[in-house]
Image (tube, grey):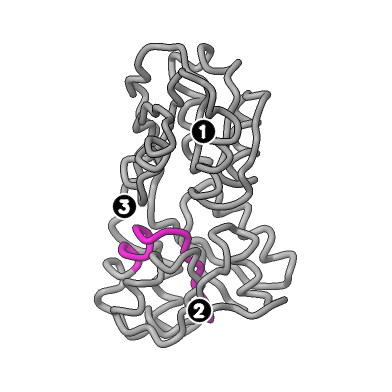
Amino acid sequence: MRLLITRPEPDNERTAAMLRVLSHEVMLAPLLRIEAIGNADLGAPPWAAILLTSANGARAIAGHPRRNELMGLPVLAVGESTAIAARAAGFGDVTSADGDARDLVRLSVARFAASRLPLLYLVGEDRTGDLAGELAKQGQSVRTVVIYRAAKTSHFPTAARVALGQGRIDGVLHFSRRSVENYLDCGQDLIEQALAPVHYCLSGRAAEPLRHAGAARVLVAERPDEASLLTLVTPKGRPKT
């Protein structure tokens, strides 16, 4: 298939490589640009552990001026991709919840229910859910620090725009609701062609704007991770529509 990946750099390259191994033609159209917030206020230590729900958080803290204060802390990551990014950033004690935010809450409670120290939650400027609130219900204190932001691009790359306009894209991979919203914004003047491919979405929340816009073929990954999304493209099970 001829596929368009809207994921930000650098993760889009990894996704593209896996799809090319499966003999798909891949074009990149990153619709968000990840920007680290270099002066993010981490607050005062000590902390029990670091919580990460995105690989972008791990990459952002790697360049923070107070990075060295954190390297000895355990890290709880929402999934394996985030855990890999945390290890690449220099963290040694990294555990993956292998799931979503609910799994991360369960892991945190299991590991640190007896700790009186707060957890340091490194997040993006735009996020869904209330992880800190859920942990507070379990008696865990959380300091939430916005460590990066995702800035929208203003238009499709030229090659992607031409391919969509000419009907040469069979499927589009979407990894977040915000990138879906920007996909629709960038495609306003060729909306029929932009909605025509199969849309593979990481979550139901990401899929909603496409369905509201009239996309006829929207598939949602069974779990909110890259492996599940790629399974939709090369089916080994039953995708959820």
Q: Quadrant of residue 233?
A: bottom right
Mark 2 closeness class: few <14, some 14–19, many ≥20 residues within 10 Å: many
Q: Amino acid at mark 1?
A: Arg
The structure residue drawn at horizontal position 43% and vertical position 31%, both measured from the top left corner, is 121
Label 1: which secondary element = helix
Percent position of residue 117, x then y:
46, 18
Answer left or right for 223 relative to 137. Answer: right
Q: Quadrant of residue 74?
A: top right
Q: Which mark is residue 169?
A: 2
Q: Which mark is residue 59?
A: 1
Percent position of residue 19, x then y:
67, 65
In depth, the one of 193 and 139 nearer the eye is 139
Q: Nearer the viewer, mark 2 or mark 1?
A: 1
Dot placed on the residue nearer the N-terminal end, 3 or 2:
3
Q: Which residues are magenta?
A: 169-183
- Quickly name the residue at label 3: 152
